[in-house]
Amino acid sequence: MSLTGFLDRLSDVPTLDRAIEPARTAVRAALRPTALKDLLHGTWLGHPLHPVVIQVPTGSWLSAGLLDAIPPLRPAATVLIGTGVAASVPAALTGAADWAEQGAGVRRLGALHAALNVVATGLYVGSLVARARRRDGLGRGLAYAGLAVATGSASIGGHMSYAQSSGASHSAAAARALQHDWMDLGPLDDFPDGRPALRTGSGGSADVPLVAVRRGARVDVFVGNCSHASGPLQEGTVEELRGRTCLVCPWHGSAFDLDDGTPRRGPAANHQEKLDVRMDAGRVLARLAGRHQG
């Protein structure tokens, strides 16, 4: 069985949830303040923060492995190992915040990913201790063991991101299925004012759900799949958030600015795909934005 097959099989094991759920509950309780959650999710950045932060420990530890192979440069390797250990703290915090808001399969693999990262960090801490005690051979051995474990953990993280779409924009993926022509969504009078309404966009092989919000004579239309975890935005609500009118996802509470789809509250970090809209004889027409054309 390939590694991918093994990871997919592991993510289907529900018995893991018994051990995972208490940890998830604790993380969500610790990250209850909205400002802290938005900071760690990367809502302010418009992109998940975890993939950015992990570059520091990963790069530091990989570079340390190279420098450890060159005797005159080993003191610099020690500095890089310490840098990686320090940077693993914000990496763990951002990862935990994202993990707690993911689907069951991603959470199961994420628990293994986190456990391996803890082991790798522990090995690097042991390496620093050994080096401080002049046991340089042991220090290098522990560091290379840490690099091996961290590499294995990174492969799991990659599977979560690319195979299971953790952190990817589900809104953008759904938008790619839409046709590029103007779509007639119906008469303006059929849209309820101030409430999300479900409409259907024509796709290449299957229709795509759209969500429309009317505000007087204006209608904002978005892909109906929430960018965070593909939640049904047509079942959400319209709320005022820090002076902005937002569409709020019913699953995890992500809030998107109706003016441009920018996330104003997490866990979503990616913007919500918004369609161009025009009126024609009292009917609402919408199509994909220009960046999706061609």
Image (cartoon, grey):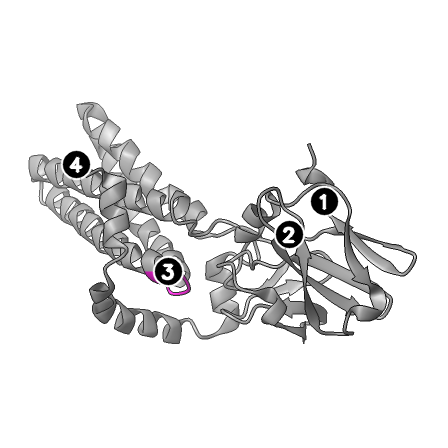
For the residue labelled by badge 3, is the local secondary structure a helix, a strand or a loop? helix
Q: Quadrant of residue 188?
A: bottom right
Residue beneath label 1, please?
289
First along the sequence among labels 4 and 2: 4
- Estimate the spatial distance between the alpha carbons at disc 4 and disc 1, rounded to whole Å: 48 Å
Residue beneath label 4, please?
144
Residue 167 vs residue 182, the one in the foreground? 182
Residue beneath label 2, please?
273
Q: In which quarter of the image is residue 110?
A: bottom left
Residue 12 vs residue 29, the one in the foreground? 12
State the predominant SS element of the stretch in magenta: loop
Residue beneath label 3, please?
99
First along the sequence among labels 4 and 3: 3
Q: Are marks 4 and 1 in contact (CB under 8 Å)?
A: no
Q: From this viewpoint, is residue 151 visible?
A: no
Q: Nearer the viewer, mark 4 or mark 2?
A: 2
Q: Are marks 1 and 2 in contact (CB under 8 Å)?
A: yes
Amino acid under disc 3: Trp
- Estimate the spatial distance between the alpha carbons at disc 4 and disc 3, rounded to whole Å: 27 Å
> Which span of residues is magenta-colored?
99-104
* The magenta stretch spans residue 123: no
Amino acid under disc 4: Tyr
Residue furthest to the front: 205
Amino acid under disc 1: Ala
Residue drawn at point x = 36 percent, y = 48 percent: 160
Residue drawn at point x = 11 percent, y = 37 percent: 141
239 vs 267, left or right, is right
- Estimate the spatial distance between the alpha carbons at disc 3 and disc 1, rounded to whole Å: 31 Å
Q: Find residue 128 and report its horizontal and vertical position in percent.
A: 17, 45
278 vs 79, left or right, is right
The mark tally for this picture is 4
